Image: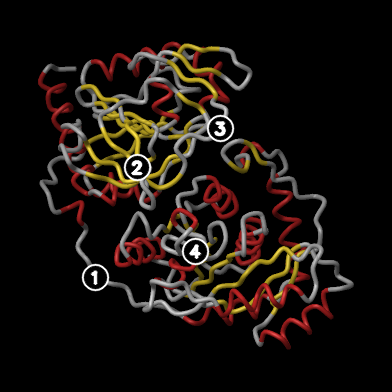
Amino acid sequence: MKRLMIAAPKSGSGKTIVTCGLLELFKRRNIPLASFKCGPDYIDPLFHKRVLGLDSQNLDSFFESPQGLRKTFFAACKGKEEGLAMIEGVMGYFDGLGGTTARASAWEVASILECPVFLTVDARGSSLSLAALAKGFLEYEPSGFPERGKGRIAGLILNRVSPMIYPRLKETLEKELKIPVAGYLPPLDFLHLENRHLGLVLPEEIEDFREQIDRLADVLEETLDVEVLLSAAEAGGPEEEKTENSFLKGKQGEPFCLGVARDEAFCFYYRENIRAMEAAGAVIKEFSPIHDSCLPEGLDGLLLGGGYPELYAGQLEQNRSMRECIQKAALEGMPVLAECGGFLYLLETLEDPDGHCHEMAGVFSGGSQKGVRKGNFGYLTLTAREKLPFLPKGGSIRGHEFHYWQTDCPGEGALAQKPEGKKQWLCMRHRPNILAGFPHLYYPSCPEFVQNFGEKCREYGAKKRRKGQ
C-alpha cells in the first residue's frame, strides 16, 4: 500500500491539523484510506476517526518488534491495497524513549515501514533559517541504528506562512535543500482545537468540528500540491510478512462475551488491543457507564479503558444502577481489566476538577483526586511481583502511563520500570479475576496475558451457565 508520514521538528508544529486536512482532501478524491498515529497517543487517532468514520491505528516500535509493527500495519491496510496509508508522527521526528534516543520515534517507525516523510515546519517568525533547520533533519543520522540510515524526508510543508512570502520562500528552500516544498498553511483563525490536561479536547466536544475540517480541506486544496505528496507516496515499502497469530497458539475454546465501556468518559482504547481480544475469542459488546442503566446481558468479562471520568464524575455518580451492576459483577467473580480512568471508576470516590467528591463503583477501597503535576509519565515495562489474575509471577507486559489524577492506593502487585533510566514504581491492585491500575497496557506485547484473560472469562461464563444464571 502507498504510504506517507506527516512528521515535524517538534510538538505543536501542526501535524494533526495537516494530517486531518489531508485525510479529508484525499477522502474527497475517493482514495481508499487507512490512518495511523505513531506512539501511544489515544486522542489524535480519535480525530482521524472523526474525519474518516474509520478506526485509526497506533504504530509503536516500543510496544512491538519491527516484524510485529509491520504486521499491525498490514492488518489495518487489508482490503485497501490500492489506496493510501496516512501516518501522523509523534513529538519531534527523532524524539524517542527518555528524550535521549531515537528508539520508538516517528523516524524509527518510518524506517521500519520504508515510508517517505513530509516534515511540517512551523515557519512563523522564520525565513532562511528554515533551510538550516530542515538541512539538519535531512542529514542527521541517529547513532546506534546503523541499519536504518538517514531521515527519509521527501519534502516539506510550511505552517503559518503568509501567502505573500510563500512563493519566494519555496523557491529558496527548494534551491538550498534539493527537496520539494509541497505547500503551506496560512494562519487560520477558524481552527479552534483546544488543549486540556491530557492533550487536545476530544473531537466530539468541538461543536463545529466538521465545519472546521471542511474549511481546512478547502484551504489545503488551494495551498498544497497534492500531486507532489501522492507522487512521493508511490515509493511503496516492505512486503507483507506471513506470520502466525500468536493469540491463537494457545487453547482457543468457545467464544466469550466481553463488555467494553465506551462513551465520553471511557474512550481510550488501542485498536490492536481490541483485535487481540477478538483473536482470543472475544465477542465485543459496548456499553456506556454514563448513559446505560445496566450492563449488557450475557457478559463473561469487562474491559474498562481510560479516558476522562473525572470530567463526568457527577454523571457517573448519578448512574447508581450501573455502578451497582459493575460492583456486583466484579465481586461475584466476573473477570475485569481496568486501566487508568477505568481504575479510578472502580475506587470508592473520584474528585472532579472543581474539587467535589463523587461516589464511584467501590470495587476497591480508596479514592482519587487531582494531582499538582503529571503522574508517572511515559513508557514502562510492567512485571508481576506476585501471581496476578492474568499474569504469572515474573511475567511482563509493556504499556505507558499518562495521568494527572492520583490516589494514595495505586497498588503493589507489579513493578513498573522505565525503559531508559532507573526510575521504577509499584502499581496494580487486584482481587480474584480483577486487575486494575494506572498503566495503559499493550496486550500484543504479552499474548499470554490475553490468553489467560480469555480463559478466565470462559471459566466464569461456564460457571454462570451451570448455575442457570
Across and down, in percent, residue 402 comes to 48, 39
Question: Dot 2: few (<14), some (14–19), or many (≥20) neighbours within 10 Å?
Answer: many
Q: Amino acid at mark 3?
A: Arg
Q: CA distance from mark 4 to mark 3?
A: 26 Å
Judging depth in this view, the residue of 366 and 223 nearest the camera is 366
Give the mark toward the camera: 2 or 3.
3
Q: What residue is at 28 percent from the left and 51 percent from the top?
A: 445
Q: CA distance from mark 2 to mark 3?
A: 22 Å
| Tag of residue 106 | 4
Q: CA distance from mark 2 to mark 4?
A: 20 Å
* Callout 1 secondary element: loop
- Circle nearer the N terminus (4, 1): 4
- Circle nearer the N terminus (1, 3): 1
**Quadrant of the drawing holding the N terminus:** bottom left
* Callout 4 secondary element: helix
Q: CA distance from mark 4 to mark 1?
A: 25 Å
Q: Is residue 469 above or below residue 380?
A: above
* Callout 3 secondary element: loop
Q: Is residue 291 above or below residue 201?
A: above
Q: Which residue is mark 3?
A: 373
Q: What residue is at 39 percent from the left and 40 percent from the top?
A: 440
| Tag of residue 441 | 2
Q: What residue is at 21 percent from the left and 20 percent from the top?
A: 333
Q: Amino acid at mark 1?
A: Lys
Q: Which residue is mark 1?
A: 242
Give the mark toward the camera: 4 or 3.
3
Across and down, in percent, residue 103 comes to 41, 62
Give the mark toward the camera: 1 or 2.
2
Image-quadrant location for residue 339 = top left
* Residues at discs 2 and 4 in contact (Cβ within 8 Å): no
Judging depth in this view, the residue of 86 and 447 nearest the camera is 447
